[in-house]
Image (spheres, rainbow, N blue to C red):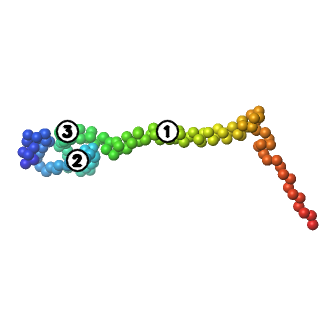
Amino acid sequence: MAERAAAGTSAEGLLKNLTGTNSIAFTKTDPVALAKILTKVAKDVPAFKFRAGWVEGRVISIEEISQLASLPSKEELISKVMFLLNAPAQRIATALAALPRNLAVVTSEAVKAGKFSGGSGAASPAAEAPAAVPAPEAPQS
Protein backbone atom coordinates (compact mmCIF):
# COMPACT_ATOMS: atom_id res chain seq x y z
CA MET A 1 0.00 0.00 0.00
CA ALA A 2 2.87 2.39 0.83
CA GLU A 3 4.46 1.68 -2.55
CA ARG A 4 1.25 2.61 -4.34
CA ALA A 5 0.85 5.78 -2.26
CA ALA A 6 4.41 6.85 -3.12
CA ALA A 7 4.04 6.21 -6.86
CA GLY A 8 4.85 9.36 -8.81
CA THR A 9 6.32 11.22 -5.83
CA SER A 10 9.90 11.86 -4.74
CA ALA A 11 9.48 9.12 -2.11
CA GLU A 12 8.87 6.45 -4.77
CA GLY A 13 12.44 5.13 -4.56
CA LEU A 14 12.24 5.00 -0.78
CA LEU A 15 9.14 2.82 -0.58
CA LYS A 16 9.88 0.57 -3.57
CA ASN A 17 9.99 -3.22 -3.05
CA LEU A 18 9.11 -3.26 0.63
CA THR A 19 8.42 -6.80 1.82
CA GLY A 20 7.91 -8.29 5.24
CA THR A 21 7.75 -6.23 8.40
CA ASN A 22 8.86 -2.63 7.99
CA SER A 23 8.91 0.48 10.09
CA ILE A 24 9.29 4.13 9.23
CA ALA A 25 11.00 6.66 11.46
CA PHE A 26 10.94 10.38 10.78
CA THR A 27 11.87 13.69 12.30
CA LYS A 28 11.06 17.26 11.40
CA THR A 29 14.03 18.75 13.23
CA ASP A 30 17.38 16.91 13.23
CA PRO A 31 18.10 14.10 10.73
CA VAL A 32 21.55 13.53 12.25
CA ALA A 33 20.08 12.71 15.68
CA LEU A 34 17.60 10.27 14.12
CA ALA A 35 20.37 8.60 12.08
CA LYS A 36 22.48 8.25 15.26
CA ILE A 37 19.60 6.64 17.16
CA LEU A 38 18.72 4.25 14.34
CA THR A 39 22.38 3.27 13.86
CA LYS A 40 22.65 2.48 17.58
CA VAL A 41 19.47 0.38 17.44
CA ALA A 42 20.81 -1.46 14.37
CA LYS A 43 23.98 -2.35 16.32
CA ASP A 44 22.00 -3.52 19.38
CA VAL A 45 19.28 -5.43 17.49
CA PRO A 46 20.67 -7.71 14.75
CA ALA A 47 17.23 -8.14 13.10
CA PHE A 48 17.00 -4.38 12.48
CA LYS A 49 18.21 -3.48 8.98
CA PHE A 50 18.22 -0.19 7.12
CA ARG A 51 16.59 -0.31 3.71
CA ALA A 52 16.76 3.34 2.72
CA GLY A 53 16.56 6.87 4.01
CA TRP A 54 15.05 10.11 2.84
CA VAL A 55 16.63 13.44 3.73
CA GLU A 56 15.60 16.83 2.39
CA GLY A 57 13.44 15.39 -0.34
CA ARG A 58 15.83 12.80 -1.75
CA VAL A 59 16.44 9.11 -1.17
CA ILE A 60 19.78 8.31 0.43
CA SER A 61 21.67 5.03 0.56
CA ILE A 62 22.61 2.99 3.62
CA GLU A 63 26.19 4.29 3.33
CA GLU A 64 24.90 7.86 3.39
CA ILE A 65 22.85 7.06 6.50
CA SER A 66 26.04 5.82 8.20
CA GLN A 67 27.87 8.99 7.15
CA LEU A 68 25.00 11.09 8.45
CA ALA A 69 25.13 9.24 11.78
CA SER A 70 28.86 10.00 12.12
CA LEU A 71 28.29 13.77 11.85
CA PRO A 72 28.15 15.85 15.04
CA SER A 73 24.65 16.63 16.26
CA LYS A 74 23.02 20.04 15.89
CA GLU A 75 23.67 20.81 19.56
CA GLU A 76 27.36 19.87 19.22
CA LEU A 77 27.75 22.11 16.17
CA ILE A 78 26.03 25.03 17.92
CA SER A 79 28.28 24.49 20.93
CA LYS A 80 31.40 24.54 18.74
CA VAL A 81 30.30 27.71 16.94
CA MET A 82 29.52 29.42 20.25
CA PHE A 83 32.96 28.43 21.58
CA LEU A 84 34.62 29.85 18.46
CA LEU A 85 32.65 33.08 18.80
CA ASN A 86 33.36 33.33 22.53
CA ALA A 87 37.11 32.57 22.38
CA PRO A 88 38.28 35.95 20.95
CA ALA A 89 36.08 37.89 23.37
CA GLN A 90 37.42 35.82 26.25
CA ARG A 91 41.01 36.51 25.16
CA ILE A 92 40.31 40.25 24.94
CA ALA A 93 38.74 40.23 28.42
CA THR A 94 41.74 38.32 29.80
CA ALA A 95 44.18 40.77 28.20
CA LEU A 96 42.26 43.79 29.50
CA ALA A 97 42.08 42.31 33.00
CA ALA A 98 45.84 41.68 32.90
CA LEU A 99 46.70 45.36 32.29
CA PRO A 100 45.98 46.67 35.82
CA ARG A 101 47.51 43.57 37.39
CA ASN A 102 50.69 43.92 35.33
CA LEU A 103 50.89 47.64 36.12
CA ALA A 104 50.60 46.88 39.84
CA VAL A 105 53.32 44.21 39.63
CA VAL A 106 55.69 46.50 37.69
CA THR A 107 55.04 49.40 40.09
CA SER A 108 55.64 47.14 43.10
CA GLU A 109 58.91 45.85 41.63
CA ALA A 110 60.01 49.42 40.84
CA VAL A 111 59.30 50.50 44.43
CA LYS A 112 61.29 47.51 45.74
CA ALA A 113 64.16 48.43 43.42
CA GLY A 114 64.04 52.06 44.60
CA LYS A 115 63.23 53.50 41.19
CA PHE A 116 60.92 56.14 42.70
CA SER A 117 63.21 57.27 45.55
CA GLY A 118 65.55 59.25 43.27
CA GLY A 119 68.48 57.16 44.46
CA SER A 120 70.99 55.09 42.56
CA GLY A 121 68.58 52.28 41.87
CA ALA A 122 68.95 50.36 45.11
CA ALA A 123 66.67 50.89 48.05
CA SER A 124 68.29 52.50 51.05
CA PRO A 125 68.76 50.30 54.11
CA ALA A 126 66.58 52.65 56.15
CA ALA A 127 63.72 52.15 53.71
CA GLU A 128 64.05 48.38 53.73
CA ALA A 129 63.89 47.73 57.48
CA PRO A 130 62.51 49.87 60.29
CA ALA A 131 65.01 51.23 62.79
CA ALA A 132 65.45 49.12 65.88
CA VAL A 133 63.66 50.54 68.90
CA PRO A 134 65.23 49.67 72.24
CA ALA A 135 63.01 47.64 74.51
CA PRO A 136 61.86 49.37 77.69
CA GLU A 137 63.71 48.32 80.79
CA ALA A 138 61.88 46.16 83.24
CA PRO A 139 61.17 47.77 86.61
CA GLN A 140 63.39 46.52 89.40
CA SER A 141 61.85 45.50 92.63
Mark closest to the chain's N terminus, 1 or 3 = 3
Q: What residue is at 12 percent from the left and 43 percent from the top?
A: 15
How far across and down, in percent of the image, does residue 89 sit?
A: 46, 40
Q: Amino acid at mark 3?
A: Ile
Q: Is residue 96 above or below residue 27?
A: above
Q: Is residue 22 left or right of residue 89?
A: left
Q: Is residue 132 left or right of residue 47?
A: right
Q: What residue is at 37 percent from the left and 40 percent from the top?
A: 81
Q: Is residue 23 above or below residue 91?
A: below
Q: Which residue is mark 2?
A: 28
Residue 136's quadrant in the figure? bottom right
Q: Amino acid at mark 2?
A: Lys
How far across and down, in percent of the image, does residue 25 sit?
A: 20, 49
Q: What residue is at 11 percent from the left and 49 percent from the top?
A: 20
Element on which disc 2 rests:
loop
Alpha carbon separation for disc pair 2 and 3? 17 Å
Q: Which residue is mark 3?
A: 60
Q: Which residue is mark 1?
A: 92
Give the foreground label among 2 and 3.
2
Element on which disc 3 rests:
strand
Q: What residue is at 79 percent from the left and 47 percent from the top?
A: 130
